[in-house]
Image (cartoon, helix red, strand yellow):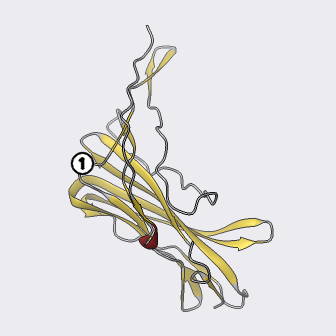
Amino acid sequence: MGASRRTITFTLASIVACGTLGMAGTAEAAGNGSKPTPPAITYDTSIARPQALGARSTSLSSGALTLAASVASVNSPARCTGYTDYPHKSGTTASVHGRIECAYPVPYVVTSTSITRDRWYGMDTLATDTSGREVSWTSYDATPHASCLNEGTYSYRGFSSHLSYEGGISYTSNTSNWQIPGVSRFAC
């Protein structure tokens, strides 16, 4: 007998100017009683605005057989929203801030944020920071800093992955910010 799978479609709303994205993303059961880990940061530059992650399956081991659990894409009940601010100069470092905010406290929220700079060979990931809280409405800021003193002028990009754990389900999403020309290009 095959595992059943159900999918719920949803409408995704994003505000490009603020770099925000509703936590409409993947819902998955943790199943093992441990805290969920934030999803991997997605460095997707093919689109000009943040996008939700696709559905990820949760595997349940049953002897030698692995079954896919039911996965549905739904909105966060606590209306959690992930944010990535514009990369900026902070003294002699390049920095970016990412966070998640919810309408009310949830059991666990976490954000991982990376700052990259454009190089001739592609993106160069400079630093990553993670911030998470238990029983909180916010993860507070994940703020990676990278030295840029005497490095020249570069374009910097910010990428974040967000997770809220509510009712035994992990809601995940990615956000990014750099799209307005000139805003995130600077020298220290």
Q: Quadrant of residue 137?
A: bottom left
Q: Is residue 146 above or below residue 73?
A: below
Local packing at callout 1 (Cα closer than 10 Å; few below 14, some 14-19, many 20+) is: some
Helix, strand or loop at mark 1: loop
- For the point 42% across and 16% down, the residue is 3
Q: How many marks?
A: 1
Q: Report the quarter where the N terminus lies.
A: top left
User: Label 1: which residue?
Assistant: 77
- The location of residue 29, given as percent across then percent down, is 35, 35
- For the point 48% across and 37% down, the residue is 56
User: For this rendering, which residue is in front, 39 or 74?
Assistant: 74
Q: Is residue 69 above or below residue 37?
A: above
User: For this rendering, which residue is in front, 131 or 82?
Assistant: 82
Q: Is residue 176 above or below residue 11?
A: below
Q: Report the quarter where the C terminus lies.
A: bottom right
**Identity of the residue furthest to the left in this view:** 104
